[in-house]
Amino acid sequence: MHVDRIDRSIGELIDQISSAEIMLPEIQREYVWKPTQVAKLMDSIYRGYPFGSLLFWQTDDAPETRAMSVSGPEVKPLRPPLFLLDGQQRLTSLHRVFTNHPDAQVVFHVENQRFQNQSAATQRDPKWIKVADVLDPKASMLRLTQQLLDAGSALADHEIEQRLSQIKQLRDRRFVMEVLKGFPYDEVAEIFVRVNSGGRRLGTLDLAMATLSTRWTGVLAKLQDEADYWLQRGYGDIDVNFLSRALAGVVLGRGLSVWSPGRLRQTKDTELERGWEVVKLGLRRLIPLLQANLRLTRSDPLPSMIVLIPLVVLLGERVDEPIDKATSDGIVYWLLLATIQTRYSTSTDTKLSQDIRAARQPDPIGALLESLNVESSRAEVTERALRGRTKESPYFFLSLLVAQARGARDWWYGTDILPAFDDAQKLEHHHIHPTATLDDRFDKNVINDLANLVFISTKANKQINGRTPAKYFPTLDAQELRAHCVPLDEDLRDADGYGRFLVARRQLLAEAMNDLLDRFRPAFLDDEDVSQADPNAGFSLELALYGSRSDGRMVFTANGEGISWVGSASMAELEAAIESARIAGIDSDVVIAGESVPVEMIEDSLNVPIGPYLVTGTPEEWRAVFDRERVASQPLSAAPSLTPTPWAGDRIKFPITSTD
């Protein structure tokens, strides 16, 4: 038994697949790559990036085989085949692109040198050219160049030719191959299992943690001890992952990237030790500040923990002197606005890098506010901005804070609505107008509107027992209602007045939220102009699931100024794409409104083009929204009949947490 190490060009390997000289043993899995992954592979090879090695098995005792997912006539090999053990997804994808397979229609934009799967938009733009057309042995570079010049390309003809030739030369790029010879089938099967069971792809945070653990002896124990310290104080989300990210942020002065492990390996012990002291000191200054100013006794209501990292840097590196009111107010104000704007829902580490740099400026509060584009404006929450919001919205967190600030209590126990961590009670919310009183007249999005949610215990909700506010409000005094921003008008207390109740309560919530924001607004901003705090105000995206997880359809309805669009997608496809991203960090594709669109992980954010929006959020946030929709799912037979209408215009970034 031995292993040969050789190399072979992509073109030779594709020819061998076509002539059945490369085959799949029965133990292989199915081809699963999506078009987005295929396009990224082409991009990597084009740019000269490493694209991995291949593992083959050569044997005289041919095993049972399975068909490769490629097109072409069935042929018998003229020589003993090689059996592919590792690299099926890559080789199959390359064969599909090179042979113009209908499910691998990868196109190339000659000006920005970008690859992607063919779409309705690329078909309309003649500057996108099909990769298979360039790779065709009979293709004329002169004709293709002229075609792109006629399409209005701004490049010179020789630049176009050079880039097209670079694609043509992909056939000559070479794979490193390892070939197992003389191994029995049972041992090859064991090798196959080991090679293909490596678990999920390591992300930047995993790599940073692994680098820290090998670079600084005992660091994981330090992180765990600190996490235990905060767990006992109600801040269990300050865990090892958060602390690793914070430590890397302090030491590197930026968010994580592919370069972070290398830079961490070069960091001196003294820098790591100093960075760790900054993290601990920053947390011990920040958390008491949040507890005192916002009555935030625990971490679980926070929509994002990353928002704390720039503030940890700011306070951890601050000179040892009392924190003045202007600084503490500015810190809280920035945290509230960053939360409303879902600051880290996209390009997480890029924005974190900006904010860490801002936190180290001579005027850190001013620099941080400048990154939110409110350094010279008044952040204002409006009734319109709260329309259609649900508990997934960042305004849900803000509604908790304003209830806290107004001294709201539970309607049954009379206790704090945000119990201390060691309290048996949890943070709870229930409907003011119970679902049972509204079901026949309003859809679930309207019933679950943020303005219909109040922070009360299960015991209080059971006491309501499905009664309208007209029945149970008389058991509460006016102050108990006012503290929760509940309107007192008696004509808003039954189903007939529910729509007007939502408007009235949104107005009260908006006023209370603005009061809270203004309470912490730095004085140096007082004389400036007025603008919105929420860039998505006036836009909405409603989700509705029809059927089950396996056979259901998710219907999307988008509205806003100049926007009116409806589309749908398979729930099974959506679930598979989200799980691939969440568990393995793998990009995928789904068909929405008849168009295949990429589902991409960019840093910590999962981005999905849905109609007029690029919907963004962490995989966990997507999972929470899907769970919400399953609870309120309707029969598949009730699904509307839709004509697939792909979106042809530009897309607006829209956080998944703002969907209805």
Image (cartoon, rainbow, N blue to C red):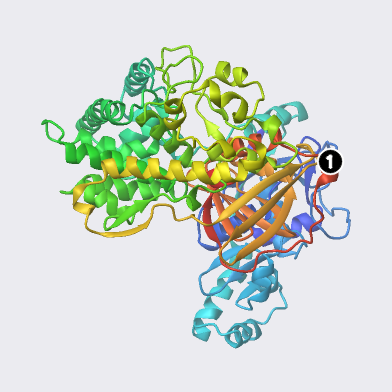
Q: Quadrant of the C terminus?
A: top right
Indicate the secondary structure of the residue bearing disc 1: strand
Give how far across and how far down residue 262 sits, in percent: 35, 42
* 310 lies above or below 190: below
Q: Position of residue 356 (x, y in %)?
A: 28, 45
The crowding category of the residue bearing disc 1, from other C-alpha atoms within 10 Å (few below 14, some 14 to 19, many at least 20), is: few
Q: Is residue 255 visible?
A: no
Q: Amino acid at mark 1?
A: Thr
**Does 574 sit left or right of 244 as displayed?**
right
Q: Closer to the camera, 610 or 217?
A: 610
From what the image shows, is residue 222 above or below residue 18?
above
Q: Residue 435, relative to residue 5: is it above or below?
A: above
The residue that appears at 79% across and 51% down in the rendered structure is 69
Query: Which residue has dot 1 on it?
Result: 65
Asked whether residue 515 is in view, the answer is: yes
- Taking depth in this image into account, of 341 and 589 the one nearest to the observer is 341
